[in-house]
Image (tube, rainbow, N blue to C red):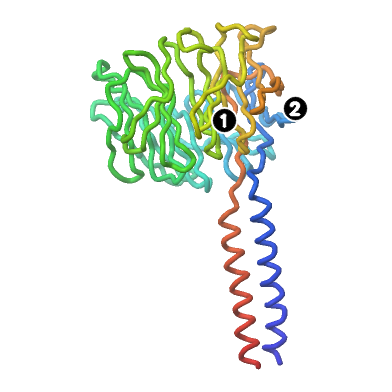
């Protein structure tokens, strides 16, 4: 009798768990849209949040110097930022800042938060050792991941693969600047290998969402190239080429892997970045999504790199304000090319970041296993009774 009483609620809970899991998985079939962006306000040097509907919220009030490189921790309960070479965190609830990495002898920049929120990757500049990629686990463990040259190398840009097993970095040898830049691939906890050499400059490195390709913008003797290559350096191909030495600023892969966006001259033979371009990864045919110069071919104001919304349906960018020289406004534009919406102003440089959408796929897995386990257990008990 007790076993029968136990089996009925166990079976009901298991079935409800399976139904709930199926509903959650169907609800996440469409990629959820990001709603919030964090940015640095130029007028008061504080961090703000702005919603895509224009709702504005001030996060910090105690920052002395302009915060840069704001990034979200995956739980959305805090933001990381760098200021005067230090890395700090601020709670979204109380707005209080505190040190995140305690090493005042070094300069920190370009933090990247892992999907789990456990690791934070960053560039660390140290005397006589150049700039290398490090990672830390919430101040409890600091680990150096790259070491390119014994006499000092400078990592100028880096990107973390989606599975967090690889890093690609553009490196400059400070002792031999005639070598130009090199692109290296580094296995986390493993060896490093140069995958692209003999180039003058690297503007951008971006992994495809599936981790199979790397999009790289580099300067060669015949101008700027947007190239695509395998992460081990194979199958290098030029997607677009620009004749002048004022090529694309940065290319970004959309989170769903179907699009690439970049700022570049409106025509390949022009010398100024004036248009926001998008291209489908199906046919790689680019089209102008927005002209920063209101239809003119040449636009002399600097426009920072575009950044995709988590649902891959919109792009955010910072453009100089026409009425306030030297200041920038944050805009949002959809893939349909409709008129951009101004979200906030004035912001500092390109210092803004989308709030990530938390991936709950692992939760679905645990719920599925738990539900099946309950159903099987209840079935075994009922079989024993009968």
* 97 vs 198: above or below: below
Q: Is residue 305 visible?
A: yes
**Quadrant of the snapshot with the C terminus:** bottom right
* 160 vs 203: above or below: below
Tell which of 98 and 256 is nearer to you: 256
**Residue at screen point 41% across, 34% down:** 214
What number is the disc on residue 70?
Answer: 1
Query: Viewed as shown, does residue 55 lie left or right of 366?
Result: right
Q: Which residue is mark 2?
A: 54
Residue 350 image offset from top left, x and y in percent: 56, 21
* 368 vs 339: above or below: below
Element at badge 2? loop
Quarter occupied by residue 18: bottom right
Tell which of 61 and 80 is nearer to you: 80
Task: Specify few, some or many for label 1: CA neighbours under 10 Å numbering under 14, 14-19, or 20 or more.
Answer: many
Give whichever of discs 2 and 1 has the lower sequence position.
2
Quarter occupied by residue 337: top right
**Residue at screen point 49% across, 31% down:** 283
Residue at mark 2 to residue at mark 1: CA–CA distance: 19 Å
* 28 vs 325: above or below: below
Residue 232 image offset from top left, x and y in percent: 32, 38
Tell which of 319 and 42 is nearer to you: 319
Quarter occupied by residue 106: top left
- Mark 2 and mark 1 residues within 8 Å of each other at the beta carbon: no
**Total numbered circles:** 2
Element at badge 1? strand
**Residue at screen point 60% across, 65% down:** 368
> Between tags 2 and 1, which lies in front?
2
């Amino acid at each position: 009798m007790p076993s029968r009483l136990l089996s009925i609620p166990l079976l009901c809970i298991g079935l409800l768990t399976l139904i709930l899991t199926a509903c959650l998985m169907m609800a996440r079939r469409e990629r959820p849209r990001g709603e919030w962006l964090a940015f640095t306000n130029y007028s008061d040097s504080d961090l703000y949040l702005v919603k895509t509907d224009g709702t504005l919220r001030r996060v910090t009030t105690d920052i002395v110097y302009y915060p840069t490189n704001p990034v979200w921790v995956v739980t959305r309960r805090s933001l990381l930022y760098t200021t005067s070479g230090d890395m700090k965190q601020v709670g979204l609830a109380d707005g209080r800042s505190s040190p995140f990495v305690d090493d005042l002898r070094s300069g920190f920049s370009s933090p990247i938060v892992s999907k789990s929120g456990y690791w934070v990757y960053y560039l660390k500049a140290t005397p006589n050792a150049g700039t290398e990629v490090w990672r830390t686990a919430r101040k409890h463990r600091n680990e150096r991941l790259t070491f390119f040259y014994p006499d000092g190398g400078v990592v100028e840009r880096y990107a973390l693969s989606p599975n967090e097993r690889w890093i690609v970095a553009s490196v400059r040898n400070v002792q031999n600047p005639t070598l130009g830049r090199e692109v290296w691939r580094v296995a986390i906890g493993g060896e490093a290998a140069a995958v692209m050499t003999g180039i003058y400059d690297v503007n951008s490195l971006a992994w495809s969402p599936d981790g199979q390709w790397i999009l790289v913008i580099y300067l060669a003797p015949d101008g700027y190239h947007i190239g695509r290559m395998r992460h081990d350096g194979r199958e290098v191909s030029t997607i677009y080429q620009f004749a002048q030495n004022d090529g694309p600023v940065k290319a970004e892969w959309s989170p769903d892997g179907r699009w690439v966006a970049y700022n570049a001259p409106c025509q390949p033979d022009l010398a100024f970045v004036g248009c926001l371009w998008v291209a489908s990864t199906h046919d790689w045919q680019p089209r102008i999504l927005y002209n920063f110069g209101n239809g003119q071919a040449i636009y002399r104001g600097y426009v920072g790199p575009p950044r995709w919304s988590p649902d891959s349906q919109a792009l955010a960018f910072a453009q100089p304000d026409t009425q306030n020289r030297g200041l920038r406004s944050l805009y949002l534009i959809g893939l349909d090319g409709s008129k951009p919406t101004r979200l906030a102003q004035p912001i500092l440089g390109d210092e803004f970041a989308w709030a990530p959408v938390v991936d709950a796929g692992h939760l679905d897995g645990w719920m599925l296993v738990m539900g099946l386990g309950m159903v099987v257990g209840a079935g075994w008990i009922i079989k024993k009774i009968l």
